[in-house]
């Protein structure tokens, strides 16, 4: 990949931006999971999770991640359709 980076700096920068956006999205997902599911499933935090809290938390995380992935795929698909339909005409 370093050969690509040195021969095509624009692609290297775009790849770096994509990677940074992916990391930011992953952080946001983890923050939202913790915020939403913890508040829902752990009404009185203690030193450990009860069995029911753990089950609730796991189920909540799975549902949240499924929804997140569905929305992300739809959004990416929509952006790709716009790009292929409009090309660069919307930029100028």
Image: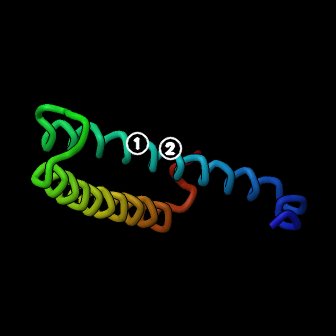
Q: Position of residue 7 (x, y in %)?
A: 89, 62
Please identify the quadrant where the C terminus is shown: top right
Q: Position of residue 77 (x, y in %)?
A: 39, 66
Alpha-carbon distance for marks 1 and 2? 6 Å
Tag 1 and tag 2, C-beta contact below 8 Å: yes
Q: Residue at x 40, y 42 (%)?
A: 28
Pick the residue in front: 30 or 1: 30
Q: Position of residue 74 (x, y in %)?
A: 32, 63
In the drawing, what numbered circle is on residue 28? Answer: 1
Q: Residue at x 36, y 58 (%)?
A: 72
In the displayed structure image, the side of residue 59 where residue 30 appears, left or right: right
Question: Dot 2 surroundings within 10 Å: few (below 14), some, or many (20 or more)?
Answer: few
Number of callouts: 2
Q: Residue at x 19, y 53 (%)?
A: 54
Q: Which residue is mark 2?
A: 24
Pick the residue in front: 71 or 66: 66
Question: Dot 1 surroundings within 10 Å: few (below 14), some, or many (20 or more)?
Answer: few
In the image, farthest residue toward the front: 47
- The kind of secondary structure element at disc 2 is helix
Please identify the quadrant where the N terminus is shown: bottom right
Q: Residue at x 20, y 34 (%)?
A: 46
In the displayed structure image, the side of residue 51 where residue 24 appears, left or right: right
Q: Position of residue 78 (x, y in %)?
A: 37, 61
């Amino acid at each position: 990949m370093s050969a690509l980076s040195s021969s095509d700096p624009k692609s290297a920068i775009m790849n770096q931006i994509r990677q940074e956006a992916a990391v930011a999205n992953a952080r946001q997902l983890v923050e939202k999971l913790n915020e939403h599911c913890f508040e829902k499933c752990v009404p009185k935090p203690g030193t450990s999770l009860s069995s029911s809290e753990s089950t609730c938390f796991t189920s909540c995380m799975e549902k949240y991640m499924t929804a997140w992935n569905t929305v992300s795929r739809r959004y990416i698909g929509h952006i790709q359709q716009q790009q292929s339909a409009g090309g660069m005409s919307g930029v100028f």
